[in-house]
Amino acid sequence: MKNRLSQLIQRDGRAMFLPIDHGYFQGPTTRLEEPGKTIAPLLPYVDAIMLTRGILRSCVDPSIQKPIILRVSGGTSMARKEELDQEGITTSIREAIRLNACAVSMSIFVGSEHEHQSLLNLANLVNECEDYGIPTMAVTAVGTELGKRDARYLALACRIAAELGARVVKTYYCEEGFEKVVKGCPVPIVIAGGPKVDSEFEVFSWVYDALQKGAVGVNLGRNIWQHDYPVAMARAIRAIIHQNATPREAQEIFNSIKSGKDV
Ligand code: R5P
């Protein structure tokens, strides 16, 4: 367990995960139509990748050395948005071990109709994975209800995930009260980015503020790989996470890489 966690959360206590699991309910998401091509230039700048077994098997070179966070929940699709909270476990622990997963991840839907089912899924997954020393990352999903991303809700969801045994929790950043979300969650928190926003500075600011308030890093996808300059985004965000760059410094790094200068 400690060995796997140390591959995910680096010696500086920080982590940069790149999720490309979106297709498990969204299908061929924009700029993730060919996941292998999307991640190839980004891999050097991330600490781990998060994806499903199907994409790992068919699109990722098995010789890559990056730790794998295997998404093991699903069974729903955007075609039935009202049922997005009804996920089950899709991948066996045996398969996770065979694929050499460093961690597994699944969504919980606190406050939704199928809350109970998703929380028991998490507890059962933790029961299985702990036997093999594999950490579980809980994804505090909000489905299409992005408005749920306030501190009170996120604190509730993150704490419950930790109580049920998640070793890492992925949540969203919120401007008001994020420090309370972190304080109430006894395991490391990483933040997602959500749908792509227009300003890269906004992304740098969230990431920076989340780290200042106690997050250990990010599990951030679309705001990197849907950007016109994904490598510049990845390198700028990496600088915030692992070199304590400020949003302004990250923007300078981004601008330099975008204009073809190296940093
Ligand atoms: C949702 O599809 C997945 O759990 C993603 O891994 C998560 O939302 C993070 O990706 P993004 O930064 O694109 O929201």
Image: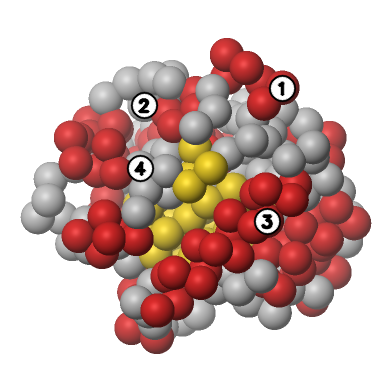
What residue do we see at 65% from left, 49% from top?
118
Which tag, 4 or 1, sits closer to the chain's start?
A: 4
Q: Residue 177: horizontal and vertical position, in percent?
A: 88, 61
The kind of residue on which mark 3 rests is Leu
Residue at left offset 42%, top offset 43%: 90
Q: CA distance from mark 4 to mark 1?
A: 22 Å
Q: Is mark 3 within 8 Å of ligand 1?
A: no
Total numbered labels? 4
Task: Residue type at mark 4: give it.
Answer: Thr
Instruction: Please give the residue where the numbered disc 3 appears in the rendered image.
Output: 119
Residue name at image x 27 percent, y 36 percent: 55
Who is closer to the viewer here, 127 or 9?
127
Quarter of the image with the C terminus is bottom left
Amino acid, disc 2: Leu
Q: Earlier in the sequence, mark 4 or mark 2?
A: 2
Q: Are marks 2 and 1 in contact (CB under 8 Å)?
A: no
Q: What whole-number distance in Å separates the C-alpha atoms at marks 3 and 2? A: 29 Å
177 left or right, relative to 10: right
Closer to us: mark 4 or mark 1?
1
| Residue at horizontal 43 percent and vertical 49 percent from the top | 72
Tell me if 46 is positioned left or right of 17 in this view: left
* Image-quarter location of ligand 1: top right
User: Disc 1 residue type?
Assistant: Glu
> As rendered, which of 173 and 184 lies closer to the eye?
184
Inspect this view and state whether residue 23 appears: yes
* Residue 247 visible in rendering: no
Local SS, label 4: loop
Q: Nearer the viewer, mark 2 or mark 1?
A: 1
What residue does disc 2 label? 32
Q: Is the residue under label 4 in contact with that under label 3 (CB below 8 Å)?
A: no
Counting residues from the start of the chain, the first of labels 3 and 4 encountered is 4
Residue 52's disc is 4
